[in-house]
Amino acid sequence: MADAALADRPRARPAQAPLLSVRDLNAWYGESHALHGVTFDVHEGEVVTLLGRNGAGKTTTLKAIMGILAKRTGSVTFEDRETIGLPARAIARAGIAYCPEERGIFSSLSVEENLMLPPQVKSGGMSVERIFELFPNLRERLSSQGTKLSGGEQQMLAIGRILRTGAKTLLLDEPTEGLAPVIIQQIGRTIERLKAEGFTIILVEQNFRFAATVADRHYVVEQGKVVDQILNDELDANIEKLHAYLGV
Ligand SMILES: Nc1ncnc2c1ncn2[C@@H]1O[C@H](COP(=O)(O)OP(=O)(O)OP(=O)(O)O)[C@@H](O)[C@H]1O
């Protein structure tokens, strides 16, 4: 195929191998079967969202990729390496970081202590100075206790903290949930900057209007499976279908 034709291909079908490839992923909470064969790909440098109703399996998909669910089957390859049998710490060292919906800020620790908590898993982690450039509020709150932070500041700290680790693939679970529009915009700008720097991001979002401002593609999750894919450029044309999926 000619180079020009390759360049014209949509992002959804680039020629190079995916960075992350999820195939027939099943996962359980104890006896409860939560994922029923999730399959999707993410290419390096993409921002991809998982959209879907409450309980569809979006968070579980992130946890299963990260290896923090005890029982999972199927295949998750990252940089062509199978990770399904690996413990979470090995997956983190491979360069994937997870920012949970509940943010996981230690209330008894200061902003600085929270920031320094996760170990660096790869070289090239972001310096604290750079993190403060992205989130100036954190610099001002450096010695504040975790409990004293607003929801927005907690979210910035949770994202800043994983940027220090050196991971270049980020799993962000509903980073905008419950936040004021001005903070949501700041998180949106941060995601854009990270994308421009080559980070790969999987974003779980309920707020598809926000998702549309940052993502290349959207996967729709329903009953523990990916049931559809919508390119961001084609979102407007598919808006009724998306409303039906999301029940809005
Ligand atoms: N800790 C748990 N123990 C048992 N079942 C769980 C647990 N967490 C989630 N589930 C179940 O797994 C399924 C998928 O939940 P999940 O949290 O992944 O959905 P979601 O799409 O992220 O939705 P939400 O936005 O509500 O978090 C649901 O049926 C849910 O009830």
Image: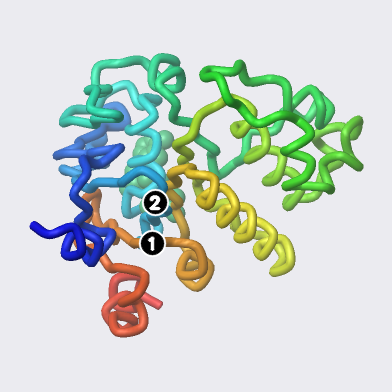
Identify the residue shown where x is 29% and y is 29%.
79
* Foreground pick, 236 / 146: 236
- Return the x and y of residue 128 as percentages of the image width and height: 76, 30
Identify the residue shown where x is 14% and y is 39%.
24
Taking the image in four quarters, ligand 1 sits in the one at top left
Q: Quick one: quadrant of the N terminus?
A: bottom left
User: Is label 1 in a helix, a strand or a loop?
Assistant: loop
* CA–CA distance in space, label 2 to label 1: 6 Å
Q: Which mark is residue 46?
A: 2
Q: Seen in the image, is 4 located left or right of residue 209?
A: left
Q: Quick one: quadrant of the C terminus?
A: bottom left
Q: Seen in the image, is 122 located left or right of residue 17?
A: right
| Disc 1: CA contacts within 10 A as few (<14), some (14-19) or many (>=20) | some
Q: Seen in the image, is 111 located left or right of residue 22?
A: right
Identify whether 148 is placed above or below 108: below
The image shows a total of numbered marks equal to: 2
| Disc 2: CA contacts within 10 A as few (<14), some (14-19) or many (>=20) | many
Q: Is mark 2 within 8 Å of ligand 1?
A: no
- Return the x and y of residue 150 as percentages of the image width and height: 80, 49
Q: Which mark is residue 45?
A: none
Q: Amino acid at mark 2?
A: Glu
User: Is label 2 in a helix, a strand or a loop?
Assistant: loop
Mark 2 or mark 1: whose residue is earlier in sequence: 2
Q: Amino acid at mark 1?
A: Asp
> According to the image, what is the colour scheme of the structure?
rainbow
Residue corresponding to mark 1: 216
Tell me if label 2 and label 1 are in contact, CB under 8 Å: yes
Residue 111 falls in image quadrant: top right
Identify the residue shown where x is 39% and y is 39%.
62
Identify the residue shown where x is 30% and y is 27%.
30
Identify whether 90 is placed above or below 42: above
Q: Is mark 1 within 8 Å of ligand 1?
A: no
